[in-house]
Image (spheres, grey):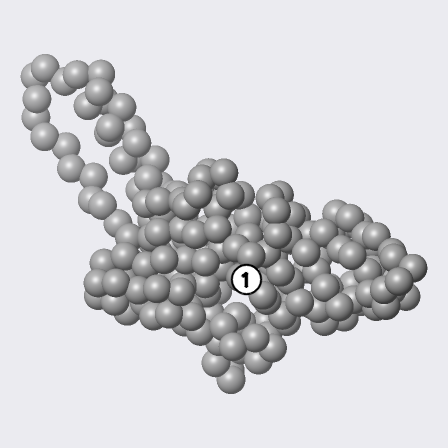
């Protein structure tokens, strides 16, 4: 977290004033995240990181964050938004930065559970603003608005992280499974800070 420092300057410019305001807002956001961490036991070992790049911006398949090996981050660690929504997981780590594969990435596959029916499916990256839930039977009682959470059966994510809600359900005569679109809760276009933490352990199952 960058410390806010004020220096005496008799000729403060408008640009300096704006920079100070940005730093104040950043410190407020980070302190709010730290407050959230103290309320959630499994978040205590998570690290607050700033997003320094989104690639590509129109289809956020990857994020670059300003924490890396020096901060204890490792490949496979889950990454959450400040609201504790799933963003993705770390796939590459350098000394001071890391690359995060978001849930929108076409390579992303996550074991999830539907909160209302407790059915397990696989969430795959798709086209913004949706990701796609597969392997839910055609006779399922799911409905629009149902919440989708991490199941705890993957190698990376603890159980119960909020991912998104079901917005589209289609049936096909030639398939045993529904075609389901899920809208992620996380807002990727205006994300500034994230929480990066430990991979799932037996205690979180």
| 65 and 57: which is toward the camera | 57
Nearer-the-camera pick, 7 or 160:
160
Is the residue marked by circle 1 packed among few (<14), some (14-19), or many (20+) residues within 10 Å?
Answer: some
| Tag 1 residue | 108
Quarter of the image where the C terminus is located: bottom right
Q: Horizontal and vertical percent for residue 110?
A: 59, 67
Q: Position of residue 141 (x, y in %)?
A: 87, 62
Instruction: State the image coordinates of residue 49 (x, y, percent, origin top left).
Output: 34, 54
Instruction: Give the residue drawn at x 28%, y 69%.
Output: 72
- The foreground one among 203 and 146 is 146
Residue 129 seen by the camera: yes
157 relative position to 50: left or right: right
Left or right of 67? Residue 90 is right
State the image quarter where residue 149 is shown.
bottom right
Residue 62, x across and y down, in percent: 43, 52
Residue at the (78%, 48%) spot, across then down? 168
Nearer the observer, 94 or 106: 106
Residue 12 falls left or right of residue 23:
left
User: Considering the numbered disc 1 on the image, is that residue within a helix, a strand or a loop?
Assistant: loop
- To which quarter of the image does residue 120 belong? bottom right
Q: Residue at x 8, y 26 (%)?
A: 8
Residue 30 appears in the picture as rendered: no
Residue at x-position 72% and y-position 64% = 134
Q: Is residue 136 left or right of residue 82?
A: right
Instruction: Judge whether 198 appears above or below 127 on screen.
Output: below
Q: Quadrant of residue 173?
A: bottom right
């Amino acid at each position: 977290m960058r410390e806010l420092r004020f220096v005496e300057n008799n000729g403060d410019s408008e640009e300096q004033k704006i920079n100070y305001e940005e730093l104040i807002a950043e410190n407020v956001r980070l302190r709010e995240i730290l407050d959230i961490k103290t309320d959630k036991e499994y978040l205590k070992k998570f690290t607050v990181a700033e997003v320094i790049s989104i690639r590509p911006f129109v289809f956020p398949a990857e994020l670059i964050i300003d924490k890396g090996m020096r901060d204890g981050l490792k490949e496979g660690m889950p990454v959450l938004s400040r609201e504790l929504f799933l963003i993705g997981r770390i796939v590459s780590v350098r000394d001071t930065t890391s690359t995060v594969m978001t849930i929108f990435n076409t390579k992303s596959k996550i074991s999830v559970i539907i909160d209302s029916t407790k059915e397990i499916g696989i969430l795959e990256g798709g086209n913004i603003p949706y990701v796609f839930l597969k392997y839910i039977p055609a006779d399922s009682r799911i409905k629009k608005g149902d919440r989708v959470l991490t199941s705890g059966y993957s190698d990376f994510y603890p159980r119960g992280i909020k991912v998104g809600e079901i917005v589209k359900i289609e049936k096909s005569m030639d398939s045993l499974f529904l075609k389901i679109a899920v809208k992620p809760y996380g807002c990727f276009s205006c994300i500034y800070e994230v929480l990066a933490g430990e991979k799932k352990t037996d205690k979180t199952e």
